[in-house]
């Protein structure tokens, strides 16, 4: 059994929808994330475009929020959780061999992708490569 490639598109649609299509993929077996690829027909021009991929509602990316540890004890978080991947401002494509949350995308789960910010870009494609878990 080879790797599985999930693909989502967000195309200009006259403002009627704001979702990635298809809406979800069903996992017929256990998979491990291998890589993410991002593409925009028109590169983000204002700021980085941001995307998140979820497995049954939980992000597959680790929290990259900025944490501060105080010598007196305690932790403060300087930003909200950052569990997204980004297509850099001015870039049309990016291969992101990214960090993923430890574990697998479990059998019988649903995998979705959300566009968080378009950054001024248009016509996006997001691909998630998965390897079967042994």
Image (cartoon, rainbow, N blue to C red):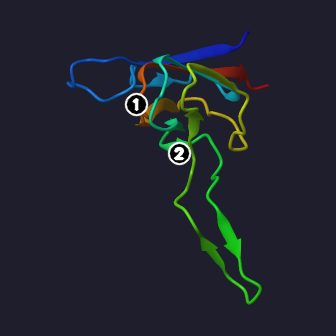
Disc 2, disc 1: CB below 8 Å?
A: no
Task: Establish if 77 lies above or below 74.
Answer: above
Q: Residue at x 61, y 40 (%)?
A: 60
User: Looking at the rendering, in which quadrant would you find the N terminus?
Assistant: top right
- Pick whichever, 79 or 46, lies toward us: 46
Q: Residue at x 75, y 26 (%)?
A: 133
- Where residue 106 sits, quadrant-wise, is top right
On the image, the x and y values in percent for residue 49 come to: 49, 34
Q: Residue at x 55, y 43 (%)?
A: 59
Find the distance from the CA under tag 2 to the CA under tag 1: 26 Å
Judge left or right: residue 101 versus residue 25.
Answer: right
On the image, the x and y values in percent for residue 20 come to: 39, 25
Residue extending farthest top: 1
Closer to the N terminus: mark 2 or mark 1? 2
Residue 108 visible in the picture:
yes
Q: Residue at x 57, y 35 (%)?
A: 86
Task: Establish if 44 lies above or below 58.
Answer: above
User: Looking at the rendering, in which quadrant would you find the C terminus?
Assistant: top right
Residue 127 visible in the picture:
no
- Pick whichever, 73 or 42, lies toward us: 42
Task: Establish if 12 lies above or below 61.
Answer: above
Residue extending farthest bottom: 72
On the image, the x and y values in percent for residue 62 come to: 65, 48
On the image, the x and y values in percent for residue 72 come to: 74, 90
- Pick whichever, 88 or 85, lies toward us: 88
Q: What residue would you read off at disc 2?
A: 58
What element does badge 1 sit on?
A: loop
**The label number, if any, that marks residue 40 in the structure image:** none
Q: Check disc 1: other Cα within 10 Å, few if <14, some if 14-19, many if 20+.
A: some
Q: Check disc 2: other Cα within 10 Å, few if <14, some if 14-19, many if 20+.
A: few
Judge left or right: residue 70 versus residue 81.
Answer: right
Q: What residue would you read off at disc 1?
A: 120
């Amino acid at each position: 059994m080879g790797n599985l490639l999930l693909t989502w598109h967000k195309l200009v649609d006259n403002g009627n929808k704001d979702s990635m299509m298809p809406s979800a993929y069903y996992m017929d077996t256990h998979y491990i994330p291998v890589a993410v690829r991002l593409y925009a027909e028109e590169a983000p021009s204002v700021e980085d475009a941001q995307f998140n991929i979820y497995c049954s509602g939980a992000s597959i990316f680790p929290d990259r929020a900025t944490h501060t540890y105080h010598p007196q004890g305690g932790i403060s978080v300087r930003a909200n959780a950052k569990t997204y991947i980004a297509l850099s401002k001015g870039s049309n494509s990016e291969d992101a061999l990214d960090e993923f949350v430890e574990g697998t995308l479990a059998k019988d789960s649903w995998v979705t992708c959300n566009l968080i910010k378009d950054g001024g870009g248009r016509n996006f494609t997001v691909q998630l490569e998965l390897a079967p878990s042994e």
